[in-house]
Amino acid sequence: MDSLTHIVLGAAIGDRILGKKIGRKAAWIGALAKTFPDFDLLYSGLNDPRKYVLYHRSYTHSFFIELLTAFPMAWIFFHLFKKKVSYGQWFLLWIVCLWCHSLLDICTNYGTRIFLPFSKKLVSLNNIAIADLIFTVPILILVVAALFYKNESIARIRVMRISLIYTVCYLGMTFVNKSIVNRHFEDSLKQQQIVYQDFMSNPTILNNIMWYAVVNSDSNLKIGEYSLLQKDKPIEWRSYPMNRQLLDSCESEDARMLTWFSQGFVFTQLNQDTLEVFIPKFGRGDLDKTSAHETFLYYYRIFKKDGKWTMDARQPSSSEMNFKEAFQQLIRKIRGI
């Protein structure tokens, strides 16, 4: 989930647990605690694709490691506030914020290793986009508004409570939406006589109305989109040859890593001596295009450099990204146009 959502939810949780005792400081500390697991970006970074895949959402997002982390962090704040708040209450704030961070992250499609060090399994429920405006903006407004009220005022307590109730209700709605769109996707696959082995669905970025599905069908990977507002418009499935043998025969360890990270949804192309690896579980970047390079704007490349296997990621340049046009395109697709 995006950092802003973690921050505002952490503020609401912190205020509800310790707001009456330490005032607005509880919201700030809750925001820190809820964001704390994403400090793994300090060593995984955003520019090194290998480190990002291997280390982001790994140990700092593990339930077990978060439990161990909560003990010293609670001790630190217990002494910073000169023991005015009990150690148990500080521990409660930290463990709730840390665990809620990972629980929210597994709702997205990146894959979170919540069972480390016992299992490297990537857990993803795929019911909410990594960034969802309809989810985040109302919570942000409610939390900011609540902080203008006095610490122990009934209005502040009620508004903070409403923000948390909205969070739970919205997440519940996403599972209902997922059930509805899955039925439409499965009906479409059946009507078009598409036989598949694996299936996944996820909402497109910024919303929970338009969804996409990815399926492994024979030697092809197919992807299609469906909006809850599109009525009778049939789902169009776009097909991409998986070329599984290219990835399986590659001697680079990065090939194995990307296969694991893709959770089974991956296709590859050979471009001269470079193996291009596309992971469509994140959806298509340009919904009007069909070719792999045009619609999947971010993909991985494995090649030999100075006799050694290396990997990088092809990222769209600023000149390629027209955010206004992309947003307008998304709105059209959501409306079913």
Image: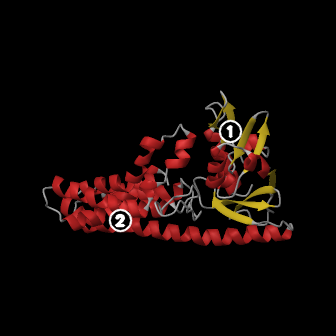
Q: What residue is shown with label 1? A: 301
Disc 2 or 1, which lies upstream in sequence? 2
Which quadrant of the figure contains the C terminus?
bottom right
Q: Would residue 23 appear left or right of 119 to someone viewing this image?
A: left
Type of amino acid under label 1: Arg
Q: CA distance from mark 2 to mark 1?
A: 39 Å
Determine contact: label 2, label 1, CB under 8 Å.
no
- Residue 67 vs residue 8, the one in the foreground: 67
In terms of secondary structure, where does tag 1 sit?
strand
* Residue 326 position in % (x across, y down): 65, 43
- Residue 243 vs residue 210, the one in the foreground: 243
* Residue 335 position in % (x across, y down): 69, 57
- Residue 160 seen in render: yes
Which labelled disc corresponds to residue 96? 2
In terms of secondary structure, where does tag 2 sit?
helix
Type of amino acid under label 2: Val
Which residue is rendered at x = 66% and y = 29% of the image? Answer: 305
* Residue 11 position in % (x across, y down): 34, 57
Which labelled disc corresponds to residue 91? none
Residue 88: which quarter of the image?
bottom left
Q: Would residue 20 appear left or right of 39 to someone viewing this image?
A: left
Vertical placement of 187 versus 29: above or below? Answer: below
Which residue is rendered at x = 42% and y = 63% of the image? Answer: 63
- Residue 288 seen in render: no
Which residue is rendered at x = 31% and y = 60% of the image? Answer: 70
* Residue 249 position in % (x across, y down): 75, 47
